[in-house]
Amino acid sequence: MPSAASATRPATQDAPAAALVDAAAELAAAVRGEAGRWDEHGALPDEAVRAVAAAGLLGLDLPARHGGAGATPAQLGEAVAHLGGVCGALRALLTVQGMTAAALLRWGGEAQRAHWLPALASGDLLAGFAATEREAGSALAEVGTRIEDDGEQVVVTGAKRWVTFGQSADVFLVLGRTDAGPTAVLVEGDRPGIVREPVTGQLGLRAARIAHLTFDRVRVPRENLVAPPGLGLTHTAAVALDHGRFTVAWGCVGMAEACLADAAEHAARRVQGGAPLADHQLVRSLLARSAVDAAGARALAERAAEARAGSPLGAATETVVAKYAAAGAAKAVADRAVQVLGSAGCEPGSRAGRFYRDAKVLEIIEGSPQVAELHIAERLLRQGVRG
Ligand SMILES: Cc1cc2nc3c(=O)[nH]c(=O)nc-3n(C[C@H](O)[C@H](O)[C@H](O)COP(=O)(O)OP(=O)(O)OC[C@H]3O[C@@H](n4cnc5c(N)ncnc54)[C@H](O)[C@@H]3O)c2cc1C
């Protein structure tokens, strides 16, 4: 693990975004040997979080006036793929920070943006996105967390589940409801009435410091509401989730490419029955199918990046397609990599083994394949099909 200083690049405001993509690659290479241990211990160490922040990666795609580097979607994607190819929790850190920042950038007032965005870009504040509840997973319109008016304050009461970095985040973007409908509010993590219950031993993303959260009449200032009451899901959370899908897609590209590399390297080196595994045509078939899956995922992620650069608000479907394809590819390529690696893929510390578990999780979160298929088919039918 490098020190934060050794992984540090010039201050975010001054560094061209392209240099930060290189910084992400360097950081990924430096921590590659550590990620398996973080997963086993169930926590990304503070030092790693600081290294990501010090490298300027938390504000990558925020505009310079808000403390970011102004990266294009393609640059953000490449940086995320580098981190995603070594550690799902590091990638998740960029994802949840970016989700909250994107929602504030789009729907926050000027004072909110000035207050929160520079701190999110620098990593002085770490954010979590708290939407899921026991009865509201894919169907977020069902959220029951109450946000009630009390003069200059609002009072938040409810229970959120599966909040990535919920154990350590400084602020949460919480999706709840007022009488006007779904509403989003920022809740600082040190407000009285918040209980964090760490989640351990889950299938994947074990180092992402996940927690279930309870909000027991937590009071926050009215100015913490993001966008007018009633727009919390269709506007605020929608922007956050769209950004999250984009970074998850690119993280999955990195995972698929990493698993393909591990499988190819092992197949070339490992000799059984007098011949390298790679000499078997059936093993080559596994590698070839994975190469096509990984390339397809990358192409669709690049297409989404291009669409977002042109029209950020009109690229939602391309982003859903990219996330759908890339998560499926990461799962399939990780599966085949573990197959080719055999027992080596099942060892503690195996990257392919870890990504085999992580990829399944990534297929479920930020929109399951079934929910994505509904979205994609709906858009297809609405726009018509050219024959
Ligand atoms: C490791 C991890 C990290 C997470 N991090 C966060 C976080 O940071 N913040 C947060 O708010 N949440 C987070 N979540 C929660 C995650 O977003 C939800 O698990 C996800 O939205 C699915 O909700 P659910 O688990 O309740 O599944 P359900 O909604 O019950 O869905 C289960 C399955 O039913 C099917 N299904 C559901 N709806 C439909 C439909 N309309 N049509 C067809 N099929 C359908 C799909 O196959 C789906 O996979 C995380 C979860 C995990 C496991």
Image (tube, rainbow, N blue to C red):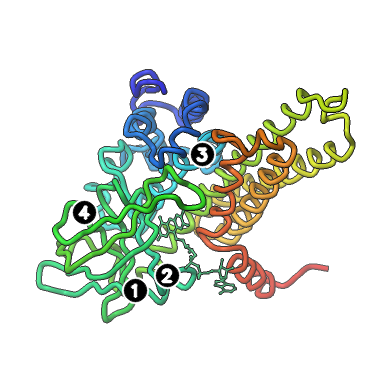
Disc 2 target residue:
234
Kindly report the distance in space between the C-alpha atoms of the residues bearing marks 4 and 1: 19 Å
Rendered position, 89 above or below 307: above
**Label number found at residue 115:** none
Give, as a three-letter code, the residue at label 2: Thr
Q: Nearer the viewer, mark 1 or mark 2?
A: 1
Q: Disc 1 vs disc 2: Cβ atoms closer than 8 Å? A: yes
Does residue 99 appear left or right of residue 138 in this picture? left
Kindly report the distance in space between the C-alpha atoms of the residues bearing marks 2 and 4: 23 Å
| N-terminal-most mark, 1 or 3 | 3
User: Which is more toward the observer, 203 or 181?
Assistant: 203
State the image coordinates of residue 96 (x, y, percent, origin top left): 40, 49
Give, as a three-letter code, the residue at label 1: Pro
Give, as a three-letter code, the residue at label 3: Val
Q: Disc 3 vs disc 4: Cβ atoms closer than 8 Å? A: no
Secondary-structure class at tag 4: strand
**Label number found at residue 80:** 3
| N-terminal-most mark, 4 or 1 | 1
Q: Classify the position of the C terminus by image quarter.
A: bottom right
Secondary-structure class at tag 1: strand
Kindly report the distance in space between the C-alpha atoms of the residues bearing marks 2 and 3: 26 Å
**Residue in view at x 26 percent, y 51 percent:** 171
Disc 1 target residue:
182
Disc 4 target residue:
188
